[in-house]
Image (cartoon, rainbow, N blue to C red):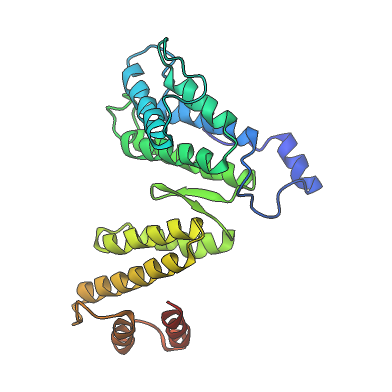
């Protein structure tokens, strides 16, 4: 669904009542409610009986049961062990009431991953333009994050922390787009692992995965361009090799050498 630039929003911008830094440990209530609306758009409303009821209910059931198993719970808020469970309501109550922001992001990440992987098929909800609907839902989620100044974005199946909007737009997103190519699958996994370690404050592990991603990327480039390289070569050797092949412009060599040293 389109995002409307309401009068109240324009007035807030005019007064300067917008976050000038990203929030990470506070998820505004308005954003939580908007996410529930997006869920109903992309995963359906399992409280309504129609032809797509079963698919919608199974999607919410999977999300709820996965969270319960990982948290060691029998049910989320509102769970009635004696009644017929409404998984959408149970999940929505969890999102609206949970105080731990990391668990809130667990629910958001898992639900959009389910939508991203299941919702693109026509068989899911039996609606045309299924993939386009999922893309719009993800686009709206990320727009809502920005609107509320919350420093996260959903990309490539994960919630990623955004520390600088410029850096995220100019460096991280292009890297993720490139790494989606199946030829960079190994580098993609290492890059996302580095992000996960970074989010958890594991700097040493994050740098280690960054180094692996750099090595895997250079090896993939060498294979694609048919340049000879040692499969067991380290980053230093691989950098020297691609530098010699002219892959990196001369005026960037110093920066790349510094990056290699840091990693």
Q: Name the residue rendered at 59%, 61% in the picture.
A: 164
In the depicted structure, whether residue 52 falls above or below residue 66: above
Query: Toward which corner of the image does residue 93 lie, by quadrant?
Result: top right
Q: Nearer the viewer, residue 235 or 112?
A: 235
Question: For the C terminus, which image quadrant?
Answer: bottom left
Q: Residue extending furthest right? A: 15
In the depicted structure, whether residue 94 falls above or below residue 193: above
In the depicted structure, whether residue 180 falls above or below residue 248: above
Left or right of 233? Residue 17 is right
Q: How many numbered discs?
A: 0
Query: Residue 74: horizontal and vertical position, in percent?
Result: 41, 25
Left or right of 212? Residue 15 is right
Left or right of 153? Residue 128 is left
Query: Toward which corner of the image does residue 11 lie, by quadrant?
Result: top right
Q: Name the residue rendered at 51%, 49% in the picture.
A: 153
Query: Residue 116: horizontal and vertical position, in percent?
Result: 37, 40
Query: Residue 85: horizontal and vertical position, in percent?
Result: 41, 16
Q: Name the residue rendered at 57%, 62% in the picture.
A: 166
Query: Residue 124: horizontal and vertical position, in percent?
Result: 31, 27
């Amino acid at each position: 669904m389109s995002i409307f630039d309401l009068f109240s929003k324009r007035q807030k911008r005019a007064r300067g009542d917008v976050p000038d830094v990203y929030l990470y440990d506070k998820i505004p209530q308005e954003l939580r409610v908007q996410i529930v609306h997006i869920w109903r758009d992309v995963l359906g409303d399992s409280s309504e009986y129609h032809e797509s009821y079963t698919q919608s209910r199974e999607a919410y059931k999977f999300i709820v049961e996965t969270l319960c198993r990982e948290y060691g719970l029998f049910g989320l808020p509102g769970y009635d062990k004696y009644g017929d469970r409404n998984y959408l309501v149970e999940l929505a109550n969890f999102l609206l009431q949970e105080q731990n922001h990391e668990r809130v992001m667990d629910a958001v990440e898992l639900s959009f991953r389910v939508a991203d992987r299941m919702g693109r098929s026509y068989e899911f909800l039996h609606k045309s333009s299924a993939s386009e609907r999922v893309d719009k839902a993800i686009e709206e989620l990320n727009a809502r994050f920005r609107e509320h100044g919350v420093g996260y974005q959903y990309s490539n199946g994960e919630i990623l922390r955004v520390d600088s909007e410029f850096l995220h737009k100019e460096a991280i997103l292009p890297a993720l787009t490139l790494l989606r190519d199946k030829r960079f699958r190994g580098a993609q996994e290492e890059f996302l692992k580095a992000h996960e370690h970074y989010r958890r404050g594991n700097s040493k592990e994050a740098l280690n995965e960054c180094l692996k991603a750099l090595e895997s990327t250079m090896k993939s480039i060498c294979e694609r361009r048919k340049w000879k390289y040692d499969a067991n070569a380290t980053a230093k050797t691989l950098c020297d090799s691609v530098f010699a092949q002219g892959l990196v412009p001369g005026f960037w060599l110093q920066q790349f050498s510094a990056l290699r040293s840091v990693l």
